[in-house]
Amino acid sequence: MEQLLGMLEEKLVEAQAKVKKRIQELIFPLLVFMVGAFAVLFFGIWQSVNQLDRSEIKASETLFYAILLNQREQLRSLVVDSSFWDAAVANLVLDFNGRWAENNVGAYLHDAHTLSGTYVVGDTNQTIYSVQDSEVTNVGLLESFPGVEDFLELVRLSHRDGTADTGLTEIRAGQNGKLFFIAAAVINADFTQFEKVDEEALQQSRHVLLLTKTLDQLYLDNISRWYPFPKIKFEKMPVEISDGTSSWDFISIDGVAIGWATWQMPLSGHEVLASTLKTISISLVGLLILIVHIVYRGMDLNRIASQGIVDFSEAKKITENYERAISDLGQRGAFYELSVDVAFKKIAINATKTMQIDLVSLWQIGEDKTSLHNLYCFNTIQGDLATTKKIALSDYPEMIDENSVPKILCTSNIWEEPSLLNFAETCFDTKEPLSFLAVPVIRHQKVTGLVCFANYDVNFDWTEDRRRFASSIGTFISIIFEVQAQKLIETELRDEKNKAEAANVAKNDFLANMSHELRTPLNAIIGFSDLISQEIYGKLGSDQYQEYIADINTSGLHLLSLINEILDVSKTQSGTYVVYPEDVDVETELENVIRLLRGRFAEKEFEIDVNVENGSERIYVDPKSFRQIIINVLSNAIKFCEAKSQISIHIVQKERNTQICIKDNGIGIPEDKLSEIFTPFVQVENIMSKKFEGTGLGLSITRALVELHHGKISIHSDVGLGTTVTIEIPVE
């Protein structure tokens, strides 16, 4: 018998030694596998991130090319629209009309489309008409763009080949070294005015209309503002391109690079890396927990082996069950795509089977941080149950302390633990004795809820394995909450982005249609009414017709002015209105404005007294915007006065601002209307009974122009006594 026991003991020791050796042989390969698996995983993610960054750089370059192509196409369409027109042939080729040119291809075209130059050249490339930056000049096209003759001949050649309505564009450097988009087309009749018999003669025209738009740093800054681009740098010399930098070469029509644009895109690779790691972190955590658990259990096997083969086998079986449960939760790729209730039900079923318990309940801290909400409760007998139960945290201070310190609460019998009795009975709506366990749900290092487990057996043992598994379930639920919150945020951001993009597209379409569809027929009305009033082709037959045609011309000019004001308001509100400040002589500008107003309000009687104090003779502003500001304010002062207008302009420099004070003796503005006076289309008078002409846009545009100069405008008025407008513009 003793010999048999000795043999059994010897066999047991031998078995223990073999187990220890197997364990030691297993640990090192397992660690190598873990490190290798993590290395391969992270290397693959890193490669994907780099590829994503390269794709984003390529996409930004493609988008930039599309923007340039769109700009060239817009300029080409504009020059074709302006040149393919009987009126253009009549006023630019057959009999040059400077006023018509100014109103149709000159300053108005520059302001509407932010052009930098307009040129009309004759058969021998002589410059007939030249406008630069909205001002008529004597600078010829060949002087501004040396070597442009080849391009002009190419335009004429395309006209002879039958593609006259297409126009040509290119990027070219000017005499000043700047780059320009240029577009040109032969001025050709559309035969709405001329007879078809003139077709052959008119088609021999070699006059060319050429439009330019500056391609400089300001233009690139506008691209950065209009489109999802960072700061774009304009370079005249080739630059070394570093990793992560996008670039584009401006190529002339002869294939030579004449400029470079570079920008640093905010690459999302690292954000994607962080997001990816965050998304797969649960799998990594599950895998890490699994590996740590295996290692831990492997080391514990030394102790288990010494207690006998039976204990070892039992422990191994328990370990395998928990490993299978954790792996089942952690390796489901679509698990976190489920809603919270469906995911919690799957977790609860898994927990009850694995931990051999009866009840699972999920609680979440409310947004007010003072209450707990019971989201779901699972009972193996009754099944899952959604609940709206809500309790105050102050009634159960033992569950979550005021500092939100994570802690696990456990008792074998709630009747023996008074601090947990009330909450446990409330949690599972029972008065029976329970074995109870609660683990925290932690998000962003703060306790945001609880997962509670219970068993009707008061002798139930909450082993370390069960507690660890319960903590893992808390981690799973925390990640589910995080994923759901991110989905909600992403959905809201996507909706807002789509709304903003739709609004921007609608605004751009409106401005484009407004500019082309309304201005073009209005200019035709104004131009033809001018021709008729001058009786170029013969008498009208009745003096009454002369009055009618004058009314048509006046109405057309008024409507065109209204459209211009609406477009100015749109540009200032959308941020596309650009000012170019320079040193301006105040008195000269005021004289020009007053002279213009005397012609506009010839039927009105008014006097304007100007007082410019020493030191205020010059101001740093955009000349065009400054004239419009003064014109808008003085026009209101003249219009809204029933008798003779007495207007005073006082200009003085105060500290770092130039103050312009304009005072009149008009009808005044009621105090309750002053807060609305700068709102577009708002007028003091009732629209059904008003006596003074106006659209309600002048002061809105004035304030926008003042604010573009970093200044401010204020109005003080007394009804029946007059109005004082004060404008302050910084000296620098």
Image: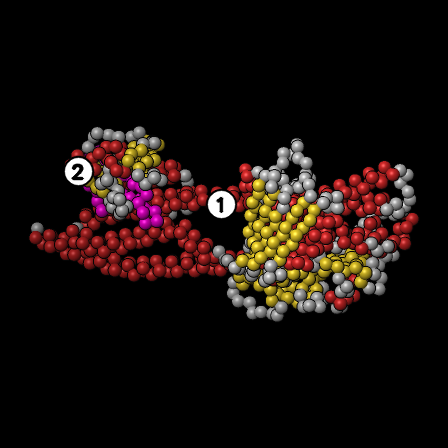
The residue that label 1 is drawn on is 493
**Scheme by which the image is coloured:** secondary structure
Q: Foreground mark, 1 or 2?
A: 1
- Seen at 35% across and 60% down, the residue is 35
The part of the chain drawn in magenta is 439-464
Q: Amino acid at mark 2?
A: Glu
Which quarter of the picture shows residue 639?
Answer: top right
Picture coordinates of residue 526 (x, y %)?
A: 78, 45
Label 1 vs label 2: CA separation? 48 Å
Viewer-side residue, 69 vs 558: 558
Which quarter of the picture shows residue 138?
Answer: bottom right
The residue that label 2 is drawn on is 417
Q: Can you see residue 256? A: no
Total numbered labels placed on residues in the image: 2
Residue 496 as seen in the image, left or right of residue 421: right
Q: Is residue 127 above or below residue 543?
A: below
Viewer-side residue, 381 vs 252: 252
Q: Is residue 360 above or below residue 607?
A: above
Q: Which mark is residue 455?
A: none
Q: For mark 2, give the secondary structure.
A: loop
Q: Amino acid at mark 1?
A: Leu
* Label 1 close to label 2 by CB (< 8 Å): no
Q: Residues within 10 Å of mark 1 (few under 14, many from 20)?
A: few
Which quarter of the picture shows residue 378?
Answer: top left
Picture coordinates of residue 109 (x, y %)?
A: 72, 53
